[in-house]
Image (cartoon, helix red, strand yellow):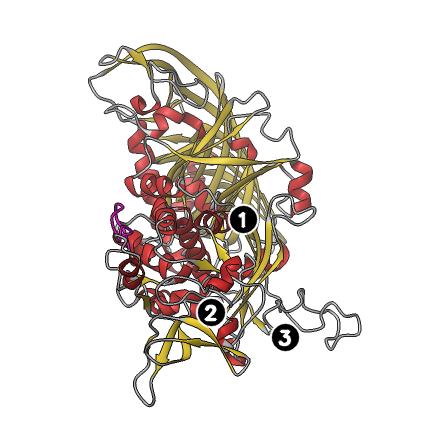
Amino acid sequence: MLRFVSKTICLSLIGLFNPLEAFQKHQKDGFFIEAGFETGLLEGTQTKEQAIAQNTQKIYENPLTHPQTKEQPKEQNKSDTATPQSVYGRYYILQNTILEKATELFTAANINGNGLTFYSQSPVYVMAYNKDNAEFEGYGNNSVVVIQNFLPYNLNNIELSYTDAQGKVVNLGVIETIPKQSQIILPASLFNDPQLNADDFQQLQTTTTPFSDANTQSLFEKLSQITTNLQMTYENTDPFSSGNNDPNGPLASPKPHYECPGYKKSCQVASVSFTPQTAEELTNLMLDMIAVFDSKSWEEAVLNAPFQFSNSPSECGIDYPKCVNPFNNGLVDPKDEKYVLTPQEVINSYRVANELTVNLLNAAKGFLGLGSQLGSTNAPGDNGFNQGVLGIAPFALDPEKLFGKTLNKVAILELRDIIHEYGHTLGYTHNGNMTYQRVRLCQEGNGPEVRCEGGKEELVNGKEELKFTNGKEVKDQDGYTYNVCSFYKDNHQVYTAGNYPNSIYTNCAQVPAGLIGVTTAVWQQLINQNALPINFANLSSQANYLDASLNAQNFATSMISAIAQNFSTTSTTTYRSSSKNFRSPILGANVKIGYQHYFNDYIGLAYYGIIKYNYAQANDEKIQQLSYGGGMDVLFDFITTYTNKKQNNPTKKVFASSFGVFGGLRGLYNSYYVFNQVKGSGNLDIVTGFNYRYKHSKYSIGVSVPLIQSGIKIASNNGIYADSVVLNEGGSHFKVFFNYGWVF
């Protein structure tokens, strides 16, 4: 045997230094792929630590599992030692997990197929579906939580919860980042309550946490002031058409949805489809408008208005005696007193729950906007909701058109359009000062058009005519103000409308006219106070997490942040620890792809890339390992056989089999997954074993041993206990593998 080994070594060395033979293609050369199983030993230490804050003598408890008390308010958890991960533990869902599941919200598929609906009281709309309902809704065949963020802002550290049948708030988990205008579908298993999907489906609540950034907290505070329930369903259909309710009408099936509104005798309205941009612009505008209507400033402005609000169900056109809009002193013609609305009626009508279908109109065909009330809150079977349909041209949503280049100055005649059409959905017509300002303009001879003064009705030749002191009424116009000074002067009254805090009526000669004037004036006031949910001037500062080119950077940033948080400690915290060592079997699989080159029958080199997956159970925790890298082996075959071996002509030799050993080095990056976290480390393995090859088939058995001794620490905190695992990499973390391959 010793003579055989010595002979083999000598022949291999002679062949290696034979240049002619070393660089010829050998029959054992070729690309190869192999795969197989591997097993080994995983050693480490698992530690459970009870964290106690010395400065408060209170344990940091997870609000997901421990209700807050008066002695321990929720804000107390945010201290020098607390992080979102240390407080919420495994129910803190990291940004990288969210970005893997996040998609654009305003897509054609969502609008056309899923009836995408915006809710003003829940602009971050979250629903939990059980398995059956998730499948029915097209979200897969497992229980899911679906998050729809209609806001143009990225939200930070948002908590999800629901109220159970006993009225108890159940906290489910905290989302690190909810990207702007995104839809996120998450497995329900990520959350804290196994009964989450006991019902078919249920809406979840969203709240900020002490860890939410200042912008998120400020935004949610503004949203909390909204009390009006606006439900807005986006549709890409033609909304109106004359004769729509007539089965013999002019339109072929399928017909548009709704009959023309009453103020339009005939209409054939063409729509255009929503784009993500136009859907965003409409949503932002509607949310701010509802916030204006719900504001204390708007309520006080309506209650203190030094003029009358009016609306008639019949249209008047330019037949001015039939128009019920006030004279410019703010008072309605006494004969039209029945059309006057009390300030409280106006407030109530704009704060009613409203179900709208919204469309975009084709401006190229002459359509700017149409609104219609389909059913009022007082109609039979209305369930307390107003119903309407609203169409608007895309250009009427352009923020620069509405608020100027600086995006903070109201352009009243542009912003009027959306307020006007929304008024129609509440049943208001053109006759009055609810959808237009309709400030009366008079002219004497060929003189300039000026605001009419005075105003009374006289019978001339049997026909009612309006008489003013400065000419004849020639039109009514928006963009003007009322002058109500004369009313107070004539009635010897003191003008007091400008006395309430933040009044918009400081000058009786320049009073914002009608509902449009009041609303736009308050809108500007709230912009100046930064009191509206959507600040159009700062939207460009929001990062686009759904941009694929940013995802890698966001992933890396999130992972670095998560790892840093895991190790956050200060001298103010002590621990009660219990540690347990473990030696656990590890089982997995590997795949190698590479190329082997032989210099002669005995010596060769193999170069390859490799990926491996392994699994182990350490005490009560599952540990998964994913490794990838590359390596090089030296091949040393003791025996090589050929068919037709006895013939002296080597060109007629055909490789049959070989047996030998191999040894080499491989560099690997090992990622460990435990506690819903990932931690990685690089290492260098030495590899050795035996190869047997028969024709193209290759069989290998070997062992790989890490050369660098290190400890990989992964930590988590569920609120009371801080769990950590230290995995020992080195000589004890070896693996034995069994592979089958094919050489091409």
> x, y percentage for residue 7?
44, 39
Q: Name the residue under label 2.
A: 394
Q: In this picture, is 359 found above or below 706?
A: below
Q: Can residue 595 be seen in this view?
A: no
Quadrant assignment, res 442:
bottom left
**Label located before the other in sequence (1 or 3):** 1
Quadrant assignment, res 472:
bottom left
Please say whether residue 470 is one of the residues in the magenta stretch.
Answer: no
For mark 3, does the 10 Å Cα neighbourhood hold few (<14), some (14 to 19), or many (20 or more) residues?
few
Residue appearing at x 37%, y 58% in the figure: 307
- Please report the bounds of the magenta region as a residue range: 495-504
Furthest-right residue in view?
Answer: 248
Q: Nearer the viewer, residue 114 or 357?
A: 357
Question: Can you tell which of label 1 and label 3 is closer to the viewer?
Answer: 3
> x, y percentage for residue 453?
33, 72
Callout 1, which amino acid?
Ile
| Cα–Cα span, label 2 and label 3 | 24 Å
Residue appearing at x 49%, y 17% in the figure: 620
Callout 3, which amino acid?
Lys
